[in-house]
Image: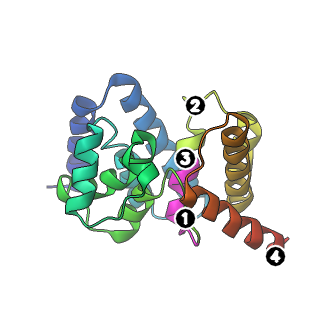
Amino acid sequence: MAKNAKRLELIHELEKELKYARFIHTMGVAFTATSLAARYDYDIDRAETAGLLHDCAKYLPIERMNAVCNKAGLTVSEMEKNSVSLLHSKAGSVLARTKYGVTDPEILDAIRYHTTGRPGMTLLDKIIFIADYIEPGRDAAPNLPEIRELAFQDLDACLMKILEDTLRYLEKSGKEIDLMTRKTYNYYKKQYKEVR
C-alpha cells in the first residue's frame, strides 16, 4: 500500500474509534508535531505517526489498559493503575505496535512518554509532549501564547516551561504528582541550568 493511502487509512480508522473532540485534538497534535518536526529538522512522517497515535488507547476501559500493559510486560505504578490520564500513554504504545503495526521504537516511546515525559527525552519525545500541550484546540493552560511561541524558538526552554507550569498546577490543586513527571522535571531543571 502506498504511504499516503496507509496514512489516510490510519486517519479514517482513528476517526471511527475516537470521540469527535478527541479526534480533532489528535489531528491538532499531528499537525503541530509535523510543524515542530519541520522546524527542528526531524522526519515529519514519524512525527505525524506519533501524533496520530498518541491517544489511540484513550477510550479503553482502565481494566483493559492494565491488561494490555501487563501482557506486554510494562511496569505500571500504583498511581498509573487507576489513572486513565497516565495509563493511556503506556497502553497506547502497545496498541500502536500490536494493532497499528508500528515497529519504530522511537515512535512507540514518544507515545509512551507523551504525558509524563522522561529523563533524556529524544527529539521526537519532546515534539509529541509539546505538541500535545500546545495544539490549536488547547485553551486551558496558562501562558499558552508564550509557550506556543517558545516552542518554535527553543524546544528545551519550552519543555522546561511546560513541566514547571504542570507541576505548579498539580501542587496548587492538591493533585498527586506522578513520579515520572517529577523525575523528568528534576532532570531537565538540572540540564537547563547547566546549559544556561
Position of 93 compared to 127: left or right?
Answer: left
Tell me which amino acid carries mark 1. Answer: Arg
Q: What amino acid type is highlighted by mark number 4?
A: Glu
126 is within the stretch colored magenta: yes
Mark 3–mark 2 Cα distance, whole angstroms, equals: 10 Å
Among the two numbered marks 3 and 2 on one chain, the one whose residue lies closer to the N terminus: 3
Q: Earlier in the sequence, mark 3 or mark 4?
A: 3
Q: Secondary structure at mark 2?
A: loop
Q: Which SS class for mark 3?
A: helix
Relative to 118, is 102 on the left or the right? left
Q: N-terminal of the two: label 1 or label 2?
A: 1
Quadrant of residue 17 in the image?
top left
According to the picture, the residue beneath numbered tag 4 turns out to be 194
Who's the residue at 77% across and 40% down the image? 146
Q: Residue at x 27, y 47 (%)?
A: 65
Magenta stretch encompasses residue 163:
no
> Mark 3 highlights which residue?
131
The residue segment tinted magenta is 120-130
| Distance from the alpha carbon under mark 1 to that under mark 2 | 22 Å
Q: Quadrant of the N terminus?
A: bottom left
Q: Are marks 2 and 4 in contact (CB under 8 Å)?
A: no
Outermost residue to the left: 1
The reply to whether residue 99 is visible in this rendering is yes
- Tell me the residue that label 2 is attached to: 138
* Residue type marked 3: Ala
Residue drawn at point x = 26 percent, y = 67 percent: 73
- Say which of marks 1 and 2 sits in front: 1
